Amino acid sequence: MSTKLMPSICPYCAVGCGLYLVVEKGKATGIEYMAEHPTNEGALCPKGNAVLEFLNHEERLKYPLKRIGEDFVRISWDEALDLAAGALARNKKKHGAKSLGFMVSSRCNNEEDYLMQKLARLLGSPNVDNCARLCHSPTVVGLGAVFGTGAMTNNLLDLQNSQCIFAIGTNFTEAHPIVSRWAQKAKDNGAVVIVADPRITSTSWMADIHLRIKPGSDIDLLRGMMKVIVDEGMIDQRFISERTEGFAELLANLSDVTLEKTAELTGVPAADIIKAARSYAKSPASALLYSMGITQHVCGTDNVKACATIALISGQIGRPGAGVMPMRGQNNVQGNCDMGGMAEFYPGYKKASDPKSLDFFKAAWKADDLPLGPGLTATEMTEAALEGRIKALYLIGEDPVICDANINKTRAALDKLDFLIVQEIFMTATAKMADLILPAAAWAEKDGSYTSMERRVQWIDQAVPAVGEAKEGLWIINEIGKRLGLDLSGTSAEDVLKEINRNVPQYGGMTKERISKIGGLRWPCPDEKHPGTDILHRERFSHPNGKANIASVVNRPPGEQTSEMYPLLLSTGRIVVHYNSGSMTRRSPSLLERDFELYVEINPKDAAELRVRQDDMVRVKTVRGETEARARVTEKVKPGMVFMPFHWQGTNIITSDALDPVSKIPEYKMAACRIEAMG
Ligand code: SF4
């Protein structure tokens, strides 16, 4: 058999970089760079270069496993599928359909995600959610409320047209490394780079203006900048009049803002606030980039709205180089949300609380009844399981036992379930708690489409067979559906894509043929003649009246404050060589050797007071528990603040599960802690 080059997409982050898999004798043996891919032009970050290390890893799950006491035993697929369907049917009969919860994976493709939420809703459960709840649910609802669409407005290539890049709450050079290529191109063309981040990061090294704000003061900073923009006449009056509503309310909202007060609240000198505001508002084209530093707060949705609003009043949106760009996390988190893998939305962002959405899908799916939403979010399902309201959970490609905030609570919740089904590629911390484990095909082992953070939908064909007896998600979901008496009509990914084309207007013209071309198409793409959309909101916003809603928000205090007992503020984030729960990157030798253990960054002043030296092991404690980490004594964090990456299980033992009341995202970025030297 000859060597083949199979076009593929990096399965890690939502940048959606293209690459080729070298396939020999049915096995992926190497990668080749895809120079013609528009987003990455052949470049890959360390994770993209290491994809085969997890794909071919000997610890891949190869057979269905069922729990017997503390052990797992290998079983047949027939037995596994009967068990899964039986557990769902039993709990539905005994406790009602709302006792069933479904977590749809943002690592799976659009077709699998679509079919999984269809299974859940046809079973009568509104409780469908995904990991966007933990990263960008404020983007979906916050940008949705302001612009009418909760997605990146421009695209990554377009960054090179920006003459000012304002990055707030994102360390994109580590979290989304290929983005920095486009930001650097803009900088090389003379763009001013503003970075608002309490830490010194590799992104802040790019900055012309680094606003080292106090953690949790993003809204204060944005309001201060907006006040400067208004007072100095830098608003885009025509844009505001013709394309927005709510400016008068914003003026009232800003009336009590002063630069002195903003400087005090944010810790940023007034002169820097003025400089940043002028650079952003006066530039011919400014892009605002943000990520989880903005979203993972109890005021995450308002943070997002404030980001959108500063863009509106400055007219920095709807043009090349000018837009609002949330940096999404997982490779298909955008697609998963588009496919209705969220408690609030049926596919295509049709509101789950609107009976008209139900009517549409009842007709589309030939269903007598469907559940009115919103269902329980991922974070609410944890609470519900603890209280005995969720009895069975079917979870695909998610690892809440590492990724949730306050994971001791998650463990307790999963322990209380009658039945936990985990569909995975590795024995994750969550899979270890399952009653039943279904081995799944990885991205290269199946057909399907993925949607990147820039709304780019790309199809890839199966490159290699699945390992062992692992199966494609579509097959597994269909087989469970059949055993429950449901015809999900989704036997092939191509068939499911055709159904998506019919039922998700943004994907109407995205046929397999069109999105198989390198670079795919960006949504909205309503019909087969439509070329896709590079920039949103050029002429009108997505609300029915075509106008954007300017938001008037004020900051709210974090869920917990530092105290004598817990005097330090803990923030968490991603590092370049690891990814989310680490289930894939911690199995990649080339990545693990670069960062192999949990660490905590602490300022030299705090370290000296605590008698902690570089590389000492320390205990980090919060009200929720404690964890051990190696100390990195560094000026990267300010006195009073510590930072830990979230790719190891220890971190989320101690993070805060206080929720944003709107998006229900936990406040990972603000936990009061103390550090104790060990022995
Ligand atoms: Fe993969 Fe993201 Fe790195 Fe690109 S930037 S290679 S998509 S992890």
Image (cartoon, rainbow, N blue to C red):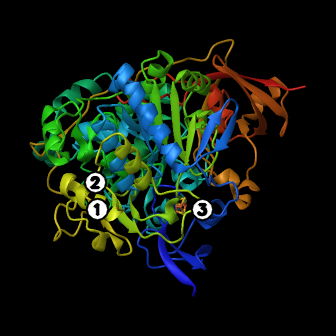
Q: Residue at x 60, y 37 (%)?
A: 430
The foreground one among 285 and 355 is 355
The kind of secondary structure element at disc 1 is helix
Quick check: 137 left or right of 49? left
Give the labeled residue for mark 3: 467
The kind of secondary structure element at disc 3 is loop
The kind of secondary structure element at disc 2 is loop
Q: Which mark is residue 390?
A: none
Q: Residue at x 28, y 48 (%)?
A: 487
Give the labeled residue for mark 1: 495
Label whose residue precedes the other's in the sequence (2 or 3): 3
Quick check: 458 left or right of 445? left
For the residue marked with disc 2, what is the amino acid? Answer: Ser
Q: Residue at x 18, y 56 (%)?
A: 502
| Whether residue 104 is visible | yes
For the residue marked with disc 1, what is the amino acid? Answer: Asp
Give the labeled residue for mark 2: 489
